[in-house]
């Protein structure tokens, strides 16, 4: 069989010196990228602006080390005592009555705190009347505790009781009265403290790039969320991993919950209990406020009457003078509209904000805060607006959508169980694990065999991030959570 010249590869095409089409300069398979390179922008366009959502805890809290798996602190109880579920079998008009305290009482002593000689107010829970009385006998030999009182009114008990196990009356102590020459008060009261605790959780992240990819440098000009500008190559993704980890350090403190007994998380993360293994999860801010704080639900407060109800609740708590409301955009608008409506020209919408407006002046339709009994300042909370975080949740009773969080400003004094003394602490602060040899506030290290690392035979560079921390919500009874 005779040989032949193979058709491929073909002979080289000869470009012509003029724009003249010939069989020698005709390209059959034209690749656009080989012929013409597109114009490119070196600078990365910031289509979402500043994408980070952290900063909340930096504004309202502080960070401090701890060396324990469990953090405990004591918060003051009420100075005065009121029982709202007190029953009696006494008849109407009785000069003396025995009352049984059905409220939850001191778990340590299992005794009610009413003592002989104290004077009390007795209010019928159905609103039918009020008595004042002096305590003449106390019986704590049985649970629940009992006390006997004699009324100051000649008409005796206003309304007959329905039984010792019921909630007939509310009782609170307002003083005491004794005859001349009698012995002093019998018994003393110990301070009523509430002990709370929380545990740190371990938060991790990592970024990995292969050694081969590190050898192919592609430069991109960037402006980062922390203010840095310049050119980056493969570390662009590492930098975003770091920013994402920074956000998680905050959102984990906001959203963390303790694992319930027999839950899946308790099974895989460990929940044996005790000081060395307190269990999975942690008490995040939302959880602590929902359990020990105040909740406004059913939509945003949009009238002064709504805020009056909030203020009335705050009066019954710590009565902190200054408070900050971190809110989503709609809640901010609702408060602005409410405050604008208080202005006599509010309907026209032109006389509030910056006054004496002219055509050259920007019209300010917002307010930074207001005072009604207490000072309330308001600010946007990016976390509640971000569509990839809380801002993207649907409205509804079961969605858990949070519209805002009221936080008392300043600091409070608590007894730190670890330090063994009273200490001033912000109402919100972060505790991270640390000792003389190990600081787990924000750890980062490089492993692998590329990028300067020489810790393994894996042909890559791995950047590791770790933190172990929890948030302590002190005085949660002074917080308000606004949710659907």
Image: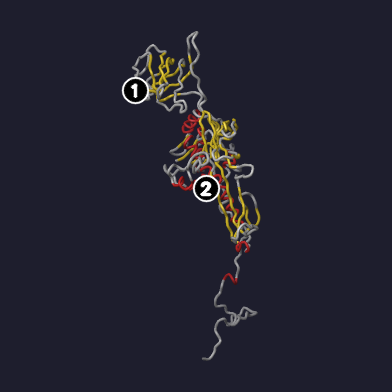
Q: CA distance from mark 1 to mark 2?
A: 55 Å
For disc 2, the neighbor class at 10 Å (few under 14, some 14 to 19, many from 20) is: some
Q: Does residue 333 appear in this view?
A: no
Question: Where does the image place residue 477, in percent across and percent down from the top left?
Answer: 50, 33
- Image quadrant in which you'd find residue 448: bottom right
Question: Where does the image place residue 419, in percent across and percent down from the top left?
Answer: 60, 33
Which residue carries the number 1 mark?
163
Task: Say which mark, if any, is on residue 386.
Answer: 2
Residue 175 in the image: above or below residue 344: above
Helix, strand or loop for disc 2: loop
Which quarter of the rendering shows the C terminus? top left
Task: Say which mark, if any, is on residue 454.
Answer: none
The one nearer the camera, 117 or 312, is 117
Question: Where does the image place residue 458, in percent across and percent down from the top left?
Answer: 59, 60
The one nearer the camera, 135 or 121, is 135
The residue depicted at 49 percent of the width and 28 percent of the height is 316
The one nearer the camera, 346 or 85, is 85
Question: Where does the image place residue 336, in percent across and percent down from the top left?
Answer: 52, 38
């Amino acid at each position: 069989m005779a040989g032949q010249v193979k058709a491929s590869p073909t002979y080289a095409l000869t470009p012509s010196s003029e724009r003249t089409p010939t069989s020698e300069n005709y390209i059959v398979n034209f690749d656009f990228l080989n012929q013409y390179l597109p114009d490119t922008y070196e600078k990365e366009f910031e289509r979402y602006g500043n994408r980070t959502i952290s900063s909340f805890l930096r504004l309202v809290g502080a960070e401090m080390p701890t060396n324990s798996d469990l953090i405990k602190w004591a918060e003051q109880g009420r100075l005065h005592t009121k029982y709202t579920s007190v029953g009696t079998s006494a008849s109407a008009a009785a000069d003396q009555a025995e009352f049984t305290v059905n409220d939850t009482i001191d778990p340590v002593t299992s005794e009610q705190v009413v003592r002989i000689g104290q004077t009390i107010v007795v209010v019928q829970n159905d609103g039918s009347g009020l008595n004042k009385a002096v305590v003449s006998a106390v019986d704590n030999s049985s649970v629940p505790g009992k006390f006997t009182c004699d009324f100051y009114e000649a008409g005796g008990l206003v309304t007959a009781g329905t039984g010792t196990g019921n909630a007939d009356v509310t009782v609170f102590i307002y003083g005491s009265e004794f005859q001349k020459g009698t012995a002093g008060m019998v018994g003393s009261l110990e301070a009523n403290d509430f002990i709370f605790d929380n545990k740190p959780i371990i938060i991790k992240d990592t970024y990995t790039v292969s050694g081969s990819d590190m050898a192919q440098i592609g430069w991109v000009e960037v402006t980062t969320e922390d203010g840095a500008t310049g050119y980056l190559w493969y570390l662009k993704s590492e930098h975003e991993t770091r920013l994402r980890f920074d956000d998680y350090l905050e959102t984990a403190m906001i959203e963390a919950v303790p694992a319930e007994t027999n839950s899946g998380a308790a099974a895989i993360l460990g929940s044996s209990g005790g000081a060395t293994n307190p269990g999975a999860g942690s008490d995040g801010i939302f959880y602590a406020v929902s359990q020990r704080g105040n909740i406004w639900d059913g939509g945003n407060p949009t009238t002064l009457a709504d805020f009056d109800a909030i203020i009335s609740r705050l009066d019954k708590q710590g009565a902190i003078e200054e408070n900050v409301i971190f809110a989503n955009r709609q809640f901010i608008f609702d408060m602005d509209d409410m405050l604008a409506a208080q202005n006599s020209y509010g309907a026209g919408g032109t006389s509030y904000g910056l006054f004496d407006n002219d055509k050259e002046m920007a019209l300010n339709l917002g307010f930074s805060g207001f005072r009604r009994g207490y000072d309330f300042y308001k600010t946007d909370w990016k976390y509640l607006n971000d569509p990839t975080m809380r801002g993207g949740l649907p409205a509804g009773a079961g969605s858990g959508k949070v519209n805002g969080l009221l936080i008392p400003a300043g600091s409070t004094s608590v007894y730190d169980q670890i330090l063994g003394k009273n200490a001033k602490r912000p109402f919100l602060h972060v505790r991270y694990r640390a000792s003389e040899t190990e600081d787990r506030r924000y750890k980062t290290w490089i492993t692998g065999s590329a990028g300067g690392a020489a810790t393994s035979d894996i042909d890559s560079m791995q950047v590791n991030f770790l933190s172990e921390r929890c948030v302590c919500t002190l005085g949660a009874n002074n917080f308000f959570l606004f949710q659907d």
